[in-house]
Image (cartoon, rainbow, N blue to C red):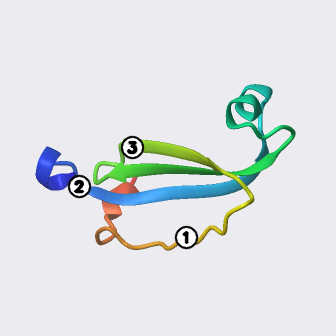
């Protein structure tokens, strides 16, 4: 994003949690009365602004692997008041 848009990504927060599907989600995914894994990720630029949000629902039929990698060195401006 930095080369194309001048936005420097410096950190992201990602969470995983088990959730029950809503009626509408279960119908769309053809998974009645199912619990799935919800993944949510928020990415921040070097000014502390949110530049991306993504989420996904994962069925229990798959093995999920997660790896983290540092995008850039830590920017202390994100923690200064």
Mark 2 in CB contact with mark 3 (< 8 angstroms) = no
**Residue drawn at the location 66% of the way across and 69% of the way down:** 63
Depth check, mark 3 against mark 1: the one in front is 1
Label 2 sits on a secondary structure element that is loop
Q: Residues within 10 Å of mark 1 (few under 14, many from 20)?
A: few
Whole-percent x, y for residue 29 in the image: 69, 37
Could you tell me which residue is drawn at 22 percent across and 51 percent down? 1
> Which residue is painted at 12% across and 54% down in the image?
3
Q: Earlier in the sequence, mark 2 or mark 3?
A: 2
Tag 3's secondary structure? strand
Q: Which residue is mark 3?
A: 52
Q: Alpha carbon of mark 3 to alpha carbon of mark 1: how far? A: 19 Å
Q: Taking 33 as reference, is 12 left or right?
A: left
Picture residue at 37% right of the left edge, 50% below the top: 44
Q: Which residue is mark 1?
A: 66
Whichever of labels 3 and 1 marks the residue nearer the N terminus, that label is 3
Which residue is nearer to you in this view: 60 or 18?
60
Nearer to me, 45 or 52: 52
**Is there CB contact under 8 Å for labels 3 and 1?**
no
Q: Which residue is mark 2?
A: 8
Identify whether 54 is placed above or below 59.
above
């Amino acid at each position: 994003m930095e080369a194309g848009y001048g936005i420097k990504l410096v950190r992201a927060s990602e969470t995983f949690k088990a959730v029950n599907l809503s009626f509408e989600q279960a119908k769309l995914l053809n998974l009645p009365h199912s619990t799935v894994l919800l993944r949510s990720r928020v990415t921040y630029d070097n000014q502390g602004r949110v530049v991306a949000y993504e989420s996904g629902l994962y069925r229990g039929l798959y093995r999920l692997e997660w790896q983290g990698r540092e995008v850039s060195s830590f920017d202390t401006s994100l923690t200064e008041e």
